[in-house]
Image (spheres, rainbow, N blue to C red):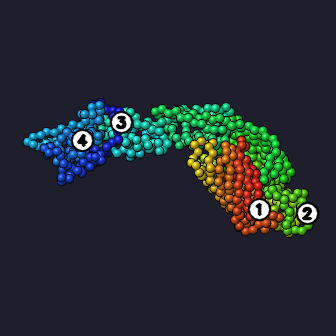
Amino acid sequence: MKKLKIRSVRAKAVPLCIVATAAGIVCAPAIVHAQAAAAGQKTAPPVAPGTPRISKIVVKGNKVLSSSAIIIASGHNIGDPCNEQTLDEMKLNLTETGNFGIQHNPDDKESWVKVYSEESNGQCTVVIEVDENDVVKNIQITGSGPIKAEEILSLIHFKSGSLYNPLYMGRDDREIEKEYNKRGFIAVLGQDESLDPKTGVLTIPIIVTRVSEIKIAKTHKTKRAVILREMNTKVGDYFNRKTWNDDLQKIYNLNLFDDVVPREDLTVGQAVLTISLPEKRSGNINVGAGYSSRQQIIGRAEVSDTNFRGMGETLSLLLESGGIANQSSVELSFVEPWLDHKHTALAVSVYDKTVYRFANSLVDATAVNTTVGTDTRYNEQRIGTTISLSRPLGHRISGVLTARAETVHTDSLALGGIDASILQNGPIFVLGAMGQHDSRDVPLDPAAGGFQSMGISVGHANLTPPSAPDPSINTAVFGPHTFAKLSLEDRHFFSLKGARKKPTDSKPVLAFRALLGSSVGTQPFFEQFFVGGAETLRGYREDRFWGKNMILTSLEMRQPLGRALTGVLFTDIGDAWGGGYSNVNIAGFKQSGFTPHVGVGLGIRVRTPLGPIRLDYGIGNEGGQTHFSIGNVF
C-alpha cells in the first residue's frame, strides 16, 4: 500500500481530544464529558411525548478503540432520545475527535463516521460505523538538526499502539516549532509528514533554517574578515536569532561603525543575512589644548587610527606638554584585537609620561621653615612599557595577563621625616592576571548587563630617595621589596525603560559600581590604592586618600536630555587606608583610619567622537570639587 501523506489535512482546527488507544480515548471534548456524565444519570433527559429512546448502541469498524470508548466519545448513551438531533450530535462529536477517516478519505468527511438507527419491535438500536486511522507503531524524526531527536520525541504524545490523530499531531507540531523558537532557531514541519500503513512508522520531517549567505554593506575601509571573525553565525550553520543578536552587538562594540543595521531574508529552510555598517572616521590628527581636573591645561597633539589597515587595529602616538608639572609626555600604543584564531588580543604601550598624582600643591605640614624643592607639585615621571594579552575563556568570560616594566622618578621636594618617604625613584616590575565577565550591551555606554572582574598582581621594586635622605626619614620603604595586590570589581546597569532596540538608543539608566582592594608587602607609594577625584570619589581632590586597602561604591542615575546630552545624579562612598604611608601628613592630605567618605553631586555627559565629555560637581565633607574628564566613570 502506498504511503499516505496527511500533512495537508492538518488544518487550523483545534483538536478536541487526545491520543486514542485500545484502552479508549484519553480525553474527549468538553461537550462529550458533559453529555457522557448526563448519560450516566438515572433520569433521562426530557423528550417530546412518543419519542423513542436508545435501547442499544452497536459500534462497527473499530479495531483499536473499544466500543465503550467510542460510545462515550459520541456524547450519548442508552436511554437518550433516538432522533435526528441525537444522531447528528453523535456523528459530529466522533468526527471532530480526529481519530477517524481523515487519514484514508481526507476529502470525504461524510464517510469518516456514519451514525444511523434501526427500529424493531419498538426498540431503537443506534449503529456507529467508524473508519479508524492507522496505528502508530514507531516514530521517526528527520532533520532535527541542533536539537536531538530524543528531545523532540518527548514533545510528542503518541505512544506505541495509538491511533494517528492529525488534529492532535498539529498541536504537537506547534510545540516542536515553539521549542525551536525558544532556543533561538527557526523550524517548520515538512509537508511530507506521513504514516506508512504497512510498517506503522510515522515520519516527522523538520526543516531547520540554515544561513545560506551573509552580506556586508556600506563598508569601505574595514576588511570583511574583521566583521566575520566577530560572528559565531557562519554560512551553513543553523540560524539562531540569539547568536545573531549577540553577533550584531559585538560588531557594534568594535566602535568602528556609526550603526549596525541588520536584515533577514527568510525562506523555508534558508536565511540570507545582510548587515549595513556605515563606518566611523577612524583616522584622526588632533592638535590643541586640553583640560582635566588632574592635569589642568596641557598642550596636546595626537595621531591615531582606530581601524589601522582596515583590520580593526589601533595605532596611536600622543604628545603632551605643559600641565601642572610643565613637563612633556610621549606615548606610542598599538592594539591587535585578533592575534590568533582563538581571539587573543595584544596591547602594547611604550611611554615616557608624567603622572599627575594629586593636582594640588604640596607643602610640608610637619616641618617649620622647610623649603620645598624646585616645585610645589608631587608627580611621577614614568618611562617604560606595558604589554597585555587577553583571550575569551567562555561566553562573555575572558582572561587577561599583563606585564609592566618602568623606571619611576618623582619630583624632588624638600619634605622631611616620614613625609619624605613618598619621594622614591627606581625600577619597578609588575605581573598581573585578571578574570572578567562582561555582559554589558554596549561597553562604552551601557544600559543593561554587568561587568565583574577579579585581578591579582605581583610586583618588585628597588627604590632609592631622589636626593640625600633626611636623617629622620623612614628608610624601610627603600631598597628591594616585593608586594602583591588583589582587586575586585562589580558593575551593574539597569535600563528604566526597557531594553534597547538598537545599540544607539538612549535610555535612562541606573548604574552601580563596587570596588574592593587589598595588598600585602612593602609597596612603593605610587603603587598604593588611591581614592578621590573624577574617577573614584567625586567631591574630593584627586588621590585624596591612599593606603593598602580600598573600598568604593558608586550609584548613578543617568537621564538622557537630548540626542547627545545626558544628565547624571551620583553618590560615591569610599575610602583608602592603612599601610606604611598612613602617617604621612602633607597639607590638606592628612590620613586617618578607615572612615567612609561620601560625595554627592550632579553632572553632564556630552557625546562626542572622542567619547563622552564629562563634567561633574560633587560635594563632600571637605567642600565641593568640579571634575572634568573624558569617558564615563564606569
Q: What element carries label 3?
A: loop
Question: Reading the chain from its start, which is encountered first: label 3 or label 2?
Answer: 3
Q: Can residue 391 be seen in this view?
A: no
Q: Is residue 574 left or right of residue 93?
A: right
Which residue is drawn at the image coordinates 76% and 49% (left, top)?
385
* Residue nearer the viewer, 446 or 51: 51
State whether residue 67 is above or below residue 277.
below
Nearest to viewer (mark 3 / mark 4): 4
Q: Mark 4 is on which residue type?
A: Glu
* Residue nearer the viewer, 77 or 292: 77
Whether the residues at callouts 3 and 1 have beta carbons within 8 Å, the answer is no
In the picture of the structure, the residue carrying the numbered disc 3 is 11
Q: Residue 623 carries which label?
A: 1
Q: Can residue 37 be seen in this view?
A: yes
Question: Reading the chain from its start, which is encountered first: label 1 or label 4?
Answer: 4
Query: Mark 3: few, some, or many residues within 10 Å (few <14, many ≥20)?
Result: few
Question: Reading the chain from its start, which is encountered first: label 3 or label 1?
Answer: 3
Nearest to viewer (mark 2 / mark 4): 4
Query: Mark 1: few, some, or many residues within 10 Å (few <14, many ≥20)?
Result: few
Q: Mark 1 is on which residue type?
A: Gly
Query: Disc 3 versus disc 4: distance between alpha carbons?
Result: 22 Å
Which residue is drawn at the image coordinates 40% and 43% (left, top)?
175
Find residue 593 and report its image quarter.
Answer: bottom right
Question: Reading the chain from its start, which is encountered first: label 1 or label 2?
Answer: 2
